[in-house]
Amino acid sequence: MTALRVVPAGAAEAGVLSALYEAGFGEAWVAQELARLLSSPGVFALIALDVADEPVGFALGRVAADEAEILSISLLPAQRRRGGGRLLLDALVARCAAAGAAALFLEVAVDNAAALALYRRAGFQEAGRRKGYYKVGDAAVDALVMRQELAPGNGA
Ligand SMILES: CC(C)(COP(=O)(O)OP(=O)(O)OC[C@H]1O[C@@H](n2cnc3c(N)ncnc32)[C@H](O)[C@@H]1OP(=O)(O)O)[C@@H](O)C(=O)NCCC(=O)NCCS
């Protein structure tokens, strides 16, 4: 069980999302760029708030016609393994289904054990592999493409 709750967010929350991104991934995503992304068609954000209404995590998604993708999802390091990632993921899935998407895709680094476990447990299945998709210094890490079918329109 988690005491977190999920609320929708938009371009006005770009600063909060930028701070959450940096804390979660250890690299910057400039607020202005996030605001621009959030102003583009089909893109949406969700923020997880703790009992004091402090933001502790976020998810970004995009719906285009009958397909959707997860752009990013992260919890503050101190907040992980408490169900927040799954809560955000379930809310994102419901939002994409309600918007009419029939399938949800994501890319995840093959060495990201936590994210892989989260997605597999939530029913995502491997749909492909992108060689060298992520650059880590001089090295390159493959991405797995994962997919889940949705029941469009009913939020399930
Ligand atoms: C991936 C991430 C969002 C998961 O968030 P979280 O709040 O820790 O996940 P939850 O507590 O909801 O965990 C749900 C399930 O995912 C799996 N899981 C999550 N973290 C795990 C870990 N470190 N090791 C193994 N399994 C893990 C478990 O099956 C877990 O269920 P359980 O706790 O009942 O065993 C979080 O680790 C994170 O922010 N990572 C950094 C950013 C990132 O890599 N994002 C994904 C990019 S594709």
Image: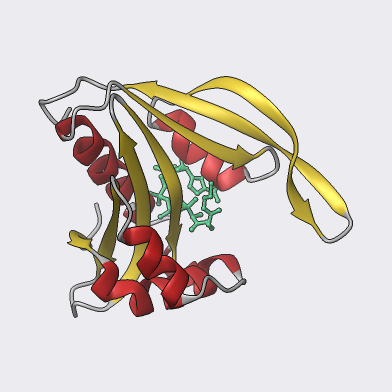
Q: Total marks drawn?
A: 0
Report the quarter where the C terminus lies.
Answer: top left
Is 103 on the left-hand or right-hand side of 155?
right
Residue farthest to the right?
Answer: 138
Instruction: Determine whether 91 is above or below 38 in the image.
Output: above
Q: Determine the residue positioned at 28% across, 21% down.
A: 102
Q: Nearer the viewer, residue 44 or 56?
A: 44
Q: Position of residue 3 (x, y in %)?
A: 20, 62
Snapshot colouring: secondary structure
Q: Position of residue 89 (x, y in %)?
A: 33, 44
Instruction: Determine whether 91 is above or below 34 in the image.
Output: above
Q: Determine the residue positioned at 87% across, 51% down.
A: 139
Q: Determine the residue positioned at 46% across, 69% down.
A: 33
Q: Position of residue 58 (x, y in %)?
A: 35, 61
Instruction: Determine whether 37 is above or below 18 in the image.
Output: above
Q: Determine the residue positioned at 38% across, 31% down.
A: 122
Instruction: Determine whether 13 is above or below 116 in the image.
Output: below
Q: Position of residue 4 (x, y in %)?
A: 23, 62
Is 153 on the left-hand or right-hand side of 85?
left
Q: Nearer the viewer, residue 18 or 58?
A: 18
